[in-house]
C-alpha cells in the first residue's frame, strides 16, 4: 500500500498562495524555491497586523454603539412609562 507524501496534501494556506499568485505557489511547491523577498514579506506582515488591530478596534466601537443604542431605547421606554 502506498502512503501519501506531504507533496500530495494541499493545505488551505497553499490555496491562498495559489489564488494570489499561482507562479509563487508553483515555485515553492514544485521547484522548492523559498522566497527571497524577506523585507517585503515582513512589511506585509506588519501591515496585516495593523489591519487586524484596526478591525478589532472597529468591532469594539460597533459593540459600544449597539450598547448605547440599547441604553437609549431603554431610557426612552422608562421615560414614557413614568
Image (cartoon, rainbow, N blue to C red):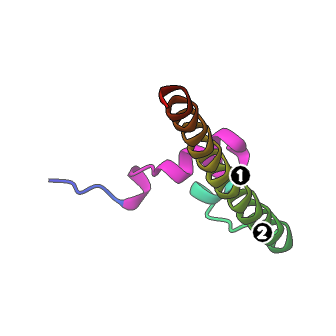
**Circle 2 or circle 1, nearest the eye:** 2
- Please tell me whether the stretch drawn in magenta is mainly helix, strand or loop: helix
Q: Quadrant of residue 33?
A: bottom right
In the rendered image, the vertical position of residue 49 relative to residue 1, given as above or below:
below
First in sequence: mark 2 or mark 1?
Answer: 1
Question: Judging from the image, what secondary structure is the residue with disc 2 in?
Answer: helix
Local crowd at mark 2 within 10 Å, few (<14), some, or many (≥20)?
few
Local crowd at mark 1 within 10 Å, few (<14), some, or many (≥20)?
some
> Which residue lies under the disc numbered 1?
24
Front residue of 26/47: it is 47
Residue under the image location 68 percent in, 55 percent down = 27
In the rendered image, the vertical position of residue 68 relative to residue 6, given as above or below:
above
Taking the image as shown, residue 69 lies to the left or right of residue 51, namely left
Q: In the rendering, at what x and y percent does residue 16 appear?
A: 60, 46
Q: In the rendering, at what x and y percent does residue 11 appear?
A: 45, 52
Residue under the image location 77 percent in, 69 percent down = 46
Taking the image as shown, residue 56 lies to the left or right of residue 11, namely right
Residue under the image location 78 percent in, 72 percent down = 42
* Magenta stretch: includes residue 24: yes
Name the residue furthest left.
1
Q: In the rendering, at what x and y percent does residue 13 appear?
A: 54, 53
Question: Judging from the image, what secondary structure is the residue with disc 1 in?
Answer: helix
Q: What stretch is highlighted in magenta?
A: 6-26
Q: In the rendering, at what x and y percent does residue 63 appear?
A: 58, 47
In the rendered image, the vertical position of residue 53 relative to residue 21, given as above or below:
below
> Which residue lies under the disc numbered 2?
46
Amino acid at each position: 500500500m502506498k502512503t501519501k507524501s506531504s507533496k500530495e496534501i494541499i493545505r488551505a494556506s497553499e490555496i491562498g498562495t495559489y489564488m494570489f499568485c499561482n507562479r509563487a505557489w508553483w515555485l515553492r511547491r514544485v521547484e522548492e524555491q523559498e522566497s527571497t523577498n524577506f523585507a517585503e514579506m515582513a512589511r506585509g506582515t506588519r501591515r496585516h497586523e495593523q489591519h487586524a488591530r484596526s478591525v478589532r478596534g472597529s468591532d469594539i466601537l460597533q459593540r459600544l454603539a449597539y450598547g448605547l443604542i440599547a441604553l437609549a431605547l431603554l431610557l426612552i421606554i422608562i421615560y414614557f412609562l413614568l
